[in-house]
């Protein structure tokens, strides 16, 4: 079946560090892929998405590239800020148009 | 502000009791999703409604039920509550059903504590 695997957290970085949060997936075909972010005390919100292989999604300085060869959709940011501290969820849209979610990765940025 | 409204924000109750959580979707959205977020279990999909009809079921316990009303708001009913039901319950909405884009708009959640 379809599944999404994310790197375990928490991930702790200093401000201005480079960020990578790994996400790999198992699915039939080429599903759309998503990153959602949950800031403390808030609901989830869509951060970025990619709908086909080699697409790059980007938003707020974050990027992720849909790699079908490695079935990955890693989230990256060149220079993180304290305000990026949140839980990040990777997800795919399955053939029934339901989102399959990763377990979430908590990111802590220290000043 | 996502436009999705959930009430109550916090709820404390005792084991064996029943509670109702309410969700108003974004204006114009026909689909409503319910999720449970426990401390160590990430997001668990419970159920989806589209324009009043149940469309998909996830890991929803028999003690839990939901419905979507003609005005499109939805309620999640949790009964015979157990300590393990303590969690954050999220509602999300989207404009479409099948053929959806995968973009959901989440409310801020209802935090349920069962003592």
Image (cartoon, coloured by chain):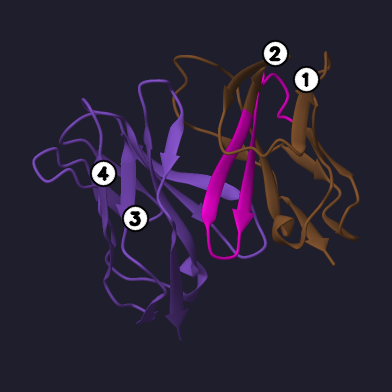
Chain colours: A purple, B brown
Residue occupying the far bottom of the picture: A111
Number of the label disc, if any, that sits on residue A25 = 4
Do callouts 1 and 4 point to residues on the same chain? no
Determine whether the residue tagged by mark 4 lies in a helix, strand or loop: strand
Residue B47 higher or lower than A7, as above or below: above
Residue underneath mark 3: A62
Residue underneath mark 2: B51
Number of the label disc, if any, that sits on residue B72 = 1
Residue visible at 73% across and 59% down?
B86
Residues rendered magenta in the picture: B25-47
- Looking at marks 2 and 1 on the same chain, the residue that comes earlier in the sequence is marked by 2
> Residue B102 versus residue A81: which sits nearer the camera?
B102
Q: Answer with the quarter of the image where residue B15 lies.
A: bottom right
Residue B32 higher or lower than A9, as above or below: above
**Label 1 Cα crowd, 10 Å radius (few <14 / some 14-19 / many 20+):** many
Spatial CA span between label 2 and label 4: 31 Å
């Amino acid at each position: 079946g379809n599944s999404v695997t994310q790197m375990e957290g928490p991930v702790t970085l200093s401000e201005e560090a480079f960020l990578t949060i790994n996400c790999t997936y198992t699915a039939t075909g080429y599903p759309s892929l998503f990153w959602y972010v949950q800031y403390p005390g808030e609901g989830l919100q869509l951060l970025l998405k990619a709908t086909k292989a080699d697409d790059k999604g980007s938003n707020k300085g974050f990027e992720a590239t849909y790699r079908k060869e490695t079935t990955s959709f890693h989230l990256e940011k060149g220079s993180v800020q304290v305000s990026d501290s949140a839980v990040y969820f990777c997800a795919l849209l399955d053939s029934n148009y339901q989102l399959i979610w990763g377990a979430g990765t908590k990111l802590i940025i220290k000043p | 502000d996502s436009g999705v409204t959930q009430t109550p924000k916090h709820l404390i109750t005792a084991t064996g009791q029943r509670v109702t959580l309410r969700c108003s979707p974004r204006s114009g959205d026909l689909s409503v999703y319910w999720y449970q977020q426990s401390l160590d279990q990430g997001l668990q999909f419970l159920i989806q409604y589209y324009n009043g009809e149940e469309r998909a079921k996830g890991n929803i316990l028999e003690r839990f039920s939901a419905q979507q009303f003609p005005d499109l708001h939805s309620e999640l009913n949790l009964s015979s509550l157990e300590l393990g039901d303590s969690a954050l319950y999220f509602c999300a909405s989207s404009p479409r059903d099948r053929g959806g884009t995968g973009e959901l708009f989440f409310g801020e959640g209802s935090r349920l504590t069962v003592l």
